[in-house]
Image (cartoon, helix red, strand yellow):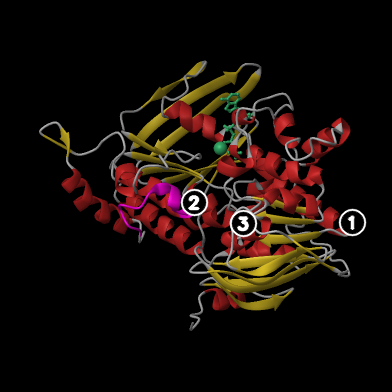
Amino acid sequence: MKTLITARGITKHFGATKALDGVDLEIFAGEVHVLLGENGAGKSTLVKVLAGIHGHDAGTIEGHASLAVIHQELALVPELSVAENLFLNRLPRRFGFVDRAEMRRRAPELLDRVGLDVDPDAKVKDLGIAQQQMIEIARALDKNAGVLILDEPTAVLTETETDRLLQIMAQLRQNGVGLVFITHHLDEIQRIADRITVLRDGRSVGVLGPKATTRHMIELMVGRPIDEQYPRAQQRPGQPLLSIEGLTKRGVFEDITIEVHAGEVVGIAGLVGAGRTEVARAAFGVDGYDRGTVKVDGKPLRRNDVQAAIKAGLGLVPEDRKGQGLVLTATVGQNLELVTLHDRDRKRLHDIAGKLRIKGRVEQPVKELSGGNQQKVVIGKWLLADPKVLILDEPTRGVDVGAKVEIYELINRMTAQGRAVLLVSSDLPEVIGMSDRVVVMAHGRVAGELPRGATQDQVMALAVQEISA
Ligand SMILES: Nc1ncnc2c1ncn2[C@@H]1O[C@H](COP(=O)(O)OP(=O)(O)OP(=O)(O)O)[C@@H](O)[C@H]1O
Ligand SMILES: [Mg+2]
């Protein structure tokens, strides 16, 4: 077995934080090597040390393979086109000028390789987050590197795109590429991993083989077993708290009617592009719509007015936390208080930070937190605001298995107090496991509704259905 990279005893501090503590890692040619660990365990830091973005305080790294990295935080330029982003920092040149013709010719090939059907001239900012992720992947693939590192690429992808990516990875493995893959989805690990290095608190606590059980993985990474993955505690539903009636935005979504009662969790499932996020944003007033009404506790909301929505008791945890959910340069504490400026309750703030097990200090800038911990801050912010109705758009994206359960318990606590939750999620086990009813959207419409206990197959059957206009 040819070894491409050997890292020994890697140690890395950020001020007083010891992010890595003597980590060993070997990457072989033709293997998929998974890095597994809780949020803040040190996975991304290890990647950045390998890539030379961060220096290290102790340890050695040997190997001559070229490296391509897909980082956890997307690094695209939103104002530029898809093609320009694909060739960012390495635009094809001819006689010293950027060769636009060459760029136009090669862009479709690259997009095709990842199965992405978008216009190369479209601006990246107009694409969904999953499509943006696929562009990052296409760009990294084109470097034909000996080692490809993928830091949580599937966090923002749905089933179909994830399948596609795992196929591409398997192909690269066959060609002798060494792959480092980070994911919190244990099922993906079981499908593709050759070896699994588990990190806990900056230390490597074990290397598992491809047959490792999820139970074993969880125990090693969390240090305790997790019994119930979806601990939904159902309530008797009360009065309607959120009523979306006939909501229509031409060309985006059509005639959406969803009612969520006090004490209820209603899920919205569907494929990318089904219009789920668009409905959530319109209901909350971020975007406008053409027809229909949104009522909170019986009171109609003014369209396109977020302040009015918040006043009426509505909250939204957006899917794009970096773009919409957080002020990265502000501290954890300041972010948690963003929507509750009138009610500075320090004790509750620490209580929520503790319940969510946010790894980081309240005084620390959010940008210094690991990706999953940033996500927990966005959720914590809205839990502190204590809205009557909370819309959660992909709330556990990038969150480790232990912290997911904490978030589900907080959802249970909200509904036990008579609040309502609308849960938009591409994670099928999650949306099925935590919802009292699941609304399935397809092509901008409600394709059907399923009661608690529905199967993944039933949800998918509705999600892929063609709806005649
Ligand atoms: N630039 C930084 N400044 C200060 N601390 C940092 C910085 N980057 C990372 N850390 C800290 O290092 C630790 C490890 O973070 P890292 O991002 O490597 O975690 P991770 O395993 O990738 O987690 P996640 O699953 O949430 O992405 C965390 O405590 C984090 O707060
Ligand atoms: Mg990370």
The magenta stretch spans residue 122 = yes
Q: Is mark 3 within 8 Å of ligand 1?
A: no
- Give, as a single range, the part of the protein colored magenta: 118-130
Q: Residue 442 falls in which quadrant of the image? A: bottom right
Circle 3 or circle 1, nearest the eye: 3
Residue at x 60%, y 50% (from the top left corner): 397
The circle on residue 417 is: 1
Q: Disc 3 versus disc 1: distance between alpha carbons? A: 25 Å
Ligand 2 position by quadrant: top right
Q: Pointer 1: residues within 10 angstroms few (<14), some, or many (20+)?
A: few
Q: Quadrant of the N terminus?
A: top left
Please, is residue 311 above or below residue 66 in the view?
below
Q: Residue 38 falls in which quadrant of the image? A: top right
Where does the image place residue 405, in percent across and percent down from the top left? 74, 51
Residue at x 79%, y 39% (from the top left corner): 340
* Residue at disc 1, secondary structure: loop
Please, is residue 417 above or below residue 372 in the view?
below
Q: Nearer the viewer, residue 218 or 345?
A: 345
Which is nearer the N-term, disc 1 or disc 2? 2
Circle 3: residue type: Arg
Residue at x 17%, y 41% (from the top left corner): 99
* Residue at disc 2, secondary structure: helix
Where does the image place residue 282, in percent across and percent down from the top left? 62, 59
Question: Residue under circle 3?
Answer: 281
Which is nearer the N-term, disc 3 or disc 1? 3
Q: Nearer the viewer, residue 198 or 345?
A: 345
Q: Nearer the viewer, residue 222 or 67?
A: 67
